[in-house]
Each structure stands twice: as structure tokens, then as C-alpha cells.
Amino acid sequence: MTTKASAIVPGDVHTRAEIMPVFGGSGQGGICPSIEKQSVNLYSDPSVGELNGYYDGWLAEEDDLGPIFEYTGAGKSGNQTFAGIVGAGNRAILRHAEQNRRLRVFTKVGLLPNSGTKTHQFIGEFTLDALEPYVWRRVHGNDNKERNVIVFRLRPDGEFQHSSKNLIPAAPETTWELVPFEIVTAANFHSDPATTGTLPVSNQRRKKASSLKKAAENAATLGTFVASEEFNKKMSLRSSAAAHIAVRHEAELTRTYMAHLKEVGRKTGAFQIKVKGLTSTLRTDLYDATEHVLYEAKGSSAREDVRMALGQILDYSRYVRTEDHPEPPKRVILLPAKPDLDMFDLCKTYGVEIVYRSENGSFIGESVPTD
């Protein structure tokens, strides 16, 4: 195989020796940064990941922004980290935007004939998801020990190769487990000393907006309102800003309430849920393990947010069980301010309580524990 910079496109298969002159990196390791080529090359080998309790690949379930590729961070034993030498590769992914590097993903295909040299398919260029760049996940390694791993959520940034061979396997059965509580948000990402600035909006998201605009233009002869490009751009920025603010408020609200629970001696955690037939992993918000109370937090008390929280907590609570508490949990929606009065009636209809923060910072609701 001869390789030129312009020759490596999504779908192409090459050895590392052929990839390195083009995109840099190294001849081994999963996360391979390159200052010279302004690239962070991510190599995924399903056989290695499976042995260590995780899978990299595409989620079958897409959201409004399109597909997501999950990539597990570096560290084959113990809890993964962003700190020190051990966490250098994970930091390289986290900092890719501020360091002006591209995330490029490669998956193992096989071996060269009559050789032990691995071949890798180039999947494409990516950027971290703007609202949830990574999640903590509890996995069981080949040593049967539990540990926390960092799962990066990657969005395609341009052309990409999407193959069923790279899909994360669907869960064969529905399972749930209590895991340590962690908050990961865009707010954490931006305020963390490890990085500065903001995450870029991927080309894929921009392409979605363009296709919507084109559809509107094609329908213009039928009297459909056509929004200008500038209007779409402003609305996109406003929506993005509003989402970031809500996420930041939700994280701060949850941390504050969790601190209150710990002050009164409550043990906290979260539930990690895999649903039969799905490739994605669900994770609940705050869980009071002492009193068996499940909380779903929202960064806004608007009607649409309360309704969303209601649907989520009704869904998640079906799986929240422990040996000490085999019965359904008490369900509580946690809000930053008092919602409309009829929202209390709506939630009460479904056996869900509301706890909200007052203007003086205290929490109000029947489930709020006291000393």
C-alpha cells in the first residue's frame, strides 16, 4: 500500500506504519497524540476491549444531533484517570479542541497476509460531544474486579464510515446495578483546569442544519415559511447557549443537594442500566441509597423540563432495586426553583414528588432530610 496525505479517507484500510507519516502518532497504544500532525489518533481493537469489560463503537440509537461513537479511555486496570502520566492519553482527548488537534478514529480490521502486522480502517474525524463529552461507566474487567472507566462520546466531524461491524453489541438482557455517583457535564469540561475554551460544533451538526434549510426552501412554493440562514444561525447559537446553561445549573443543583444528603448521613450513588436490545447505557441521576429515593434533576423549572423529568424518572425507576430495597423507590424531581402549581398536581398523579430550591438556597419538599 502506498499512502499519501490526501489518500487516506474514511473507509480506507492501512497499517500503522502507513498511517503515521500522514497523521503521526506511534506504532503502539490506543491513544496516540501527534503535535506535528495536530492529531490525536484513537485505535480501537474490539478483542482487547471485550477482555477488559467494554466495547468501543457506534451506538445504534441516534439522537437529534446524529450518531455517536463511544471510545473508552486509556487504562487496562484500576480506575481510569485524567491525572499524571497514566492519564496523559485521556487528557489529550479532552484537550483536543484547545490544542487545535483532530480526533481521528481507527478500528482494527485484521492482519496482513502471512504477517502479524495489524491493519486498521479509518472511520473519520470526530469532536467531543458538546454537552456530554464523556461519561463515567462501571465495568467488570477480566480480573473480575470492578472499576470506573472514561467513555468519550464522539461526534463525526465531516465524512465518516458507519458500518454494522462497528456497532456496539446490544444488551442480551436487561440489567441494573448501583454505581458510584459522578457528574460529567459541559460545565465540568469547560471549568476544569485541564482545559479552557469551548468545544467546537461539529460539521455533522452544521450539515444537519443545512439539510433542514434546504428542505424548507424546497417547500417554499407551497407557502412554507423559509427562515434565513442568519436566523437559523442565531437560533442555533441561542439553543446551544440555553442548553449549556441548563446543563451547568443541573450539575450545580445536583452537587449541592448531594452534599446536603451526605451532611445528614445518607449514602448516595446512581444506577447504571442496560436495557435488552439497546446498545446505549442509561444512567440515573442522584440516588439516596439509605432511604431508597431516586432523584431526577433538571437545570430549569420550566413546564417542558418538568414533563421531561417526569417521563425519565418513571422510566428509570422500573429498574432501581437493591437487595435491601426490592420494592420500587420513592421518586423525586429535583428543580432549581418552584415550578407552576399545576406541575405539582401532574407529578402527584404519577406518585412523583417535587423538591425545589427556594430563593434563600434551602430545599423545600417532603423528601428533604433534616438533621
Image (spheres, helix red, strand yellow):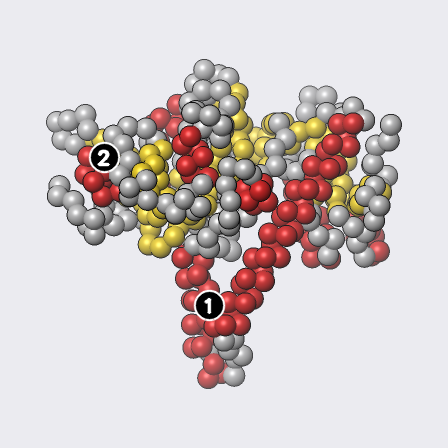
The numbered disc on residue 16 is 2
Q: Disc 1 or disc 2, which is closer to the eye?
A: 2
Q: Residue at x 50, y 67 (%)?
A: 233
- From the image, which quarter does the C terminus lie in? top right
Using the image, determine if residue 238 lies above or below residue 280: below
Residue found at the far top of this picture? 143
349, 339: nearer the viewer: 339
Q: Residue at x 51, y 50 (%)?
A: 198
Q: Secondary structure at mark 2?
A: helix
Q: Position of residue 273 (x, y in %)?
A: 58, 34
Looking at the image, residue 63 sits to the left or right of residue 167; the answer is right
The numbered disc on residue 212 is 1
Using the image, determine if residue 78 lies above or below residue 353: above
Q: Position of residue 182 (x, y in %)?
A: 61, 33
**Cα–Cα gap, marks 1 and 2:** 39 Å
Amino acid of disc 2: Arg
Q: Are marks 1 and 2 in contact (CB under 8 Å)?
A: no
**Residue 286 location, quadrant:** top right
**Residue 334 location, quadrant:** top right
Amino acid of disc 1: Leu
Looking at the image, residue 291 sits to the left or right of residue 250; the answer is right
Using the image, determine if residue 288 lies above or below residue 132: above
**Residue 71 location, quadrant:** top left
164, 276: nearer the viewer: 164
Q: Position of residue 160 (x, y in %)?
A: 33, 51
Q: Position of residue 209 (x, y in %)?
A: 46, 64
Circle 2 residues within 10 Å: few <14, some 14–19, many ≥20: many
- From the image, which quarter does the N terminus lie in? top left
Q: Residue at x 70, y 39 (%)?
A: 254
